[in-house]
Amino acid sequence: MEYNAKAIEKKWQDFWEENQAYEPKPDKTLPKKYILSMFPYPSGNIHMGHVRNYCISDAIARKFRKEGFNVLHPIGWDAFGMPAENAAIKHKTHPKVWTYSNIENMKRQLYSLGFSFSKTREFATCDSIYSKWEQSLFIAMWEKGLIYRKKGFLNWCPKDQTVLANEQVIEGKCWRCDTPVVQKEMYQYYIKITDYAQELLDDLETLEGKWPNQVLTMQRNWIGRSEGLKFTFKLENKIEYSKGAIENIEVFTTRPDTIFGVSYCALAPEHPLVKAVLENAESYGITQKQTEQILAIQNTSEKERAQQDKEGVPLGISVIHPLTHAKIPLWVANFVLISYGSGAVMSVPAHDERDYDFAKKYHLPILPVIIAKDSKAKLAKENFYDGNGILIHSQEFNGLDNEEAKIKIIEYFEKNQLGKAVVNFKLRDWGVSRQRYWGTPIPLVHCKDCGIVAETNLPVTLPEDVMIDGEGNPLDKHPYWKHCACPQCGKNAVRETDTLDTFVESSWYFLRYTTPTQLRQEEAFSRADESYWMDVDEYIGGIEHAILHLLYSRFFTKVLRSLGYTDSSEPFSHLLTQGMVTKEGAKMSKSKGNVVDPEEIIAQYGADTARLFILFAAPPVRELEWNDFALEGSYRFIKRLCAKVEKIQKIQNLPKIQSQNLNEKEKYARKKVYEALKKYQETFCHANGYAFNTLIAACMEALNALNEQDNAEIWSEGYFILLNILEPIIPHICWELSQEYFCLQNFTEIPIDKEALKEDSIVMAITINGKRRGEIKVDLTSSNGEILNLAKAEVAKWIEGKTILKEIVVPKKLVNFVVQ
Ligand code: ANZ
Ligand code: ZN
């Protein structure tokens, strides 16, 4: 048969659509599989990373469908976000128009690949009905006290009067106008993800072996649980200032064992004590220049500070060490973060690297209090040691092992009411406010009398008549949008003009998919559908989402569980992180100019070739290096598959073939076919990593083996099976051939014929005096005598003229001769 990819692919895509072949069934008694790939951002065109993502999920979805599972394999659009606004600024298009037209184009591209998505479940997160239910979930969380408003620092461009995302700050300057960016304190909304920190950490254990270890580790590090001691240092003299008086500072340390090595204390520049001191800077000997230096640190984002050299300013005041009563100087330092612990640290330069660098720079004392047990251990730096060891210069704690000292010192602090053992998390509450247009409006209203009130008339939709020019916040600038009546008292009030972080949309979209479209008008998702489909059986996406998206989704699921929306605790029972698509060793990207356009590949070779190549080139978790030669190879394989159909007969059932009547080549062909079938059953399993590449290789071997023989029945049986195996990978051609020859009756679970897999000959090694000298192929039915004769003939030159003292046959393994 001539292979005409274009015609075949169009025919079957239409057929699937007309027959709603890939819609989940309403029957909730069927066994289910929820196969989900991360939904795309509608940037305009699909790229090879998308193709790879959906080839993997589609293969899995198709396999389970054939086995009789009710499969949910949805697609949608993560449609809010900055690029739409950037496009609006650049091309003067409206974000909404830009987004929906991109969706149309990408949808066309995706369906041209024959992906078996449920068309009826599709949605975009910028649809106002999605906003409606997201807003209702937001309000439910607000009413539960899970959301609060607090001032926080944001990147601010004073010229454009706008908040900038981190990626819009380029070398400390605004991306549009080059004005130096400052940190501005503004009210923002936060979701209390920290309330769930311990649970988010603990439940990672249930994902062990189901999620990649790397991702579990990244999640653990991000949550960042530390155990330590919280205690206060008394100020030598209390500080009076406009807001009252400060008498002490609190610090958090994970190393109470080093407490006798404290040589200074360091504060974040935003610490209230720093503000208090700066009110009377002169009287503490702080110069104008130093004040400016402190303000400059404050105006640097925490991310940038992390890349800068250690830097600080002395505050001209001291605290008293709680155990030695020594005077300890106080400094402001750029490496102390206001948002962690208590924004202040006890610095131990002898045992902490940051403290060490800082002490060296400002000539502060370095006091070693732990020495290595092995006195010959080499110190990385003079007077610096960050390993375990024995305490010195630590009064009654001298001689203790430092791990033991940690416990003893915490005990001492607690007993004398000087401090407390605490657990700290790196995880911060999730700041969800964005001062942007293209997002879900935060459904809150500010009323002079009632305070902040939840909107009752949902959805709160975006105004369409806005000017997006990169200056200010379009919702705030709109002439009347924000003015409304207070939902509680009816008086004039003002809407919140912040929109939500787009990570909020992607934190529950997988729940929304579970519910048929008609029901989605009435609720965010239906309890009955959600409980049938959840949890996602296989979630497939890029490693770049290993932290935030997955953490937020896990968090949302837990919150929604506590609000009674679901019984799930973890949304994704298995996670498959696909590798990058690269070309010439670099990630495919526009900026590198090494992009291969999927549409061109489809136009030239067809969707099936693209799919086959993508799944053949590398196992899903590995990097996939683009290779034109291998692409050609995939195309040739499909053509070969078509060319050989002349040899098969039209059948509707698997033929029953008796092995004993077959010749070697026929037996071998059947063996290869059933080996491929066996591999198929093993491949589609999370634990085996879906190694489609080896499965495809097995199919290629089977086709070669079929070609070595002429038995029409064996050809037919072979195709009956191979088309079934290949259907998840190259569906169009498989449906075409299957319809023609097997009336589509081969797309079911096919049992393995164990007889066909049986080995009838095996290879045995021959050793002489224990050294390997050759091997022979013998029938499984051969007697020891026959085996020995064959073996002797094989190694004749090694035994010639020698006396054989012993002959040993280890069944199915080896023959050994002892000779002299
Ligand atoms: C003294 C010390 C000695 C420390 C030593 C470490 C090593 P993790 O493990 O990440 O929780 N720290 C506390 N609050 C901080 C803040 N707001 N900004 C920057 N650093 C802060 O880190 C806890 C350690 O980080 C704490 O233990 C503290 O320094 C510092 F040999 O106290 B440590
Ligand atoms: Zn009111």
Image (tube, rainbow, N blue to C red):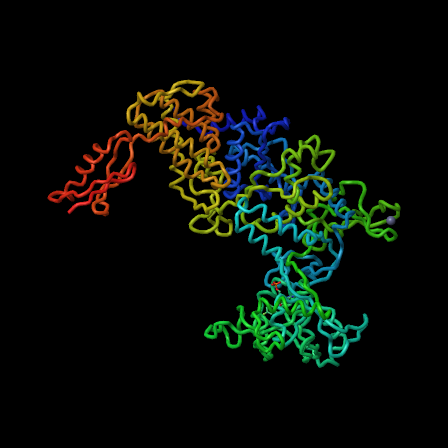
Residue found 28% across the figure and 24% down from its top: 663
Ligand 1 occupies quarter: bottom right
The residue furthest front is 805
**How many discs mark residues in the rendered view?**
0
Q: Residue 584 in the image: x percent, y percent?
A: 42, 50
Residue 764 placed where, x, y %? 27, 38
When asked about the image quadrant of residue 122, the answer is top right
- Left or right: 99 in relation to 625: right
Question: Is 59 on the left or on the right of 712, as rendered?
Answer: right
Using the image as rendered, state which of residue 391 and residue 640 is in the foreground: 391
Which residue: 47% across, 19% down?
A: 743
Residue 714 horizontal side relative to residue 413, left or right? left
Q: Nearer the viewer, residue 196 or 310?
A: 196
Point 20% across, 35% down: residue: 790
The correct choice, above or below, for 533 with respect to 194 in the image is above
**Residue 618 x, y percent position in the rendering:** 43, 43
Is residue 27 visible in the rendered structure shown here?
Answer: yes
Q: Quarter of the image for the N terminus: give it.
A: top left
- Residue 293 seen anywhere in this rendered image of the structure: no
Residue 331 screen position, x and y as percent:
66, 75
From the viewer's perspective, is 290 left or right of 402? right
Report the front residue among 28 and 284: 28
